[in-house]
């Protein structure tokens, strides 16, 4: 039997064919991976709060958790930034927010009273806050209109140049008229 002498130098035409097959296989594997990376991802359904004030704020959130109420805090949000407070689809129509301005003092509050405390907390129930050792705090209501996600824009209150303690200037209903000429 006569055999061809062995050579470590491959046939150039054969090497080109193998490289072409390798490129085709590589491309075939890359296309599905690229399609997965470029496919639209589902929209995030969250409860977010954006602090549009010039101050750092602390946020407490109240919501119905099944059959009972829960309050949580504190999220610390810097000026002109946003934070996701709850992740996933919203399950309630109404949520309640209390915010405190760390830099200038003041608060964003309302008439829905729930339990809070000074340090980080998760509190179940809104009754008997003081008897249970918590603070009783007024939250403002946020109506999400049953949307799956919602963003609250916390803005600075309009400040007037009025003198503190003075009654606001209210234009008279019937402004005075100049006297009639005789």
Image: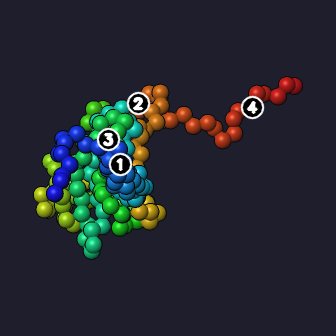
Work out which quarter of the rendered image holds the N terminus and state it: bottom left
Visible in this render: residue 173? yes
Distance between the alpha carbons at the discs numbered 2 and 4: 31 Å
Mark 1–mark 4 Cα distance, whole angstroms, equals 100 Å
- Label 1 residue SS: helix
Q: Which mark is first along the chain, 3 or 2?
A: 3
C-beta proximity under 8 Å, tags 2 and 3: no
Of the two numbered discs 2 and 3 in the rendering, the one whose residue sits closer to the viewer: 3
Frontmost residue, 107 versus 78: 78
Numbered badge on residue 17: 1
Categorize mark 2 by other alpha carbons within 10 Å: few (<14), some (14-19), many (20+).
Answer: few
Q: Quadrant of residue 134?
A: bottom left
Disc 3 from disc 1: Cα separation = 9 Å
Where residue 142 appears, as percent x and y from the top left, is: 40, 57
In the rendered image, which quarter contains the C terminus? Answer: top right
Q: Do tag 1 and tag 4 residues touch (Cβ < 8 Å)? A: no
The Cα atoms of the two marked residues, 3 and 4, are separated by 105 Å
Circles 3, 4 touching at the beta carbon (< 8 Å): no
Reading the image, the residue beneath label 3 is 12
**Secondary structure of residue under mark 3:** helix
Residue at (32, 41) in percent of width and height: 12
* Residue 164, numbered circle: 2
The residue tagged 4 is 177
Please tell me which of labels 1 and 4 falls first in the chain. Answer: 1
Q: Secondary structure at mark 2?
A: loop
């Amino acid at each position: 039997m006569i055999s061809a002498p062995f050579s470590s130098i491959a046939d150039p035409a054969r090497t080109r064919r193998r490289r072409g097959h390798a490129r085709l296989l590589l491309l075939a594997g890359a296309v599905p991976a690229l399609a997965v990376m470029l496919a639209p991802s589902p929209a995030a359904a969250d409860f977010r709060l954006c602090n549009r004030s010039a101050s750092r704020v602390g946020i407490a959130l109240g919501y119905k958790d099944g059959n009972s109420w829960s309050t949580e805090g504190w999220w610390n949000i810097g000026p002109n930034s946003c934070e996701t407070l709850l992740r996933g689809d919203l399950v309630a129509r109404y949520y309640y927010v209390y915010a405190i301005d760390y830099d200038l003092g003041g608060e964003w509050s309302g008439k829905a009273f729930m339990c809070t405390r000074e340090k980080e907390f998760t509190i179940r129930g809104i009754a008997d806050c003081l008897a249970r050792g918590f603070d009783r705090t007024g939250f403002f209501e946020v109506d999400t209109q049953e949307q799956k996600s919602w963003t609250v824009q916390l803005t600075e209150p309009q400040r007037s140049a009025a003198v503190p303690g003075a009654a606001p200037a209210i234009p008279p209903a019937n402004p005075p008229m100049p006297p009639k000429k005789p």
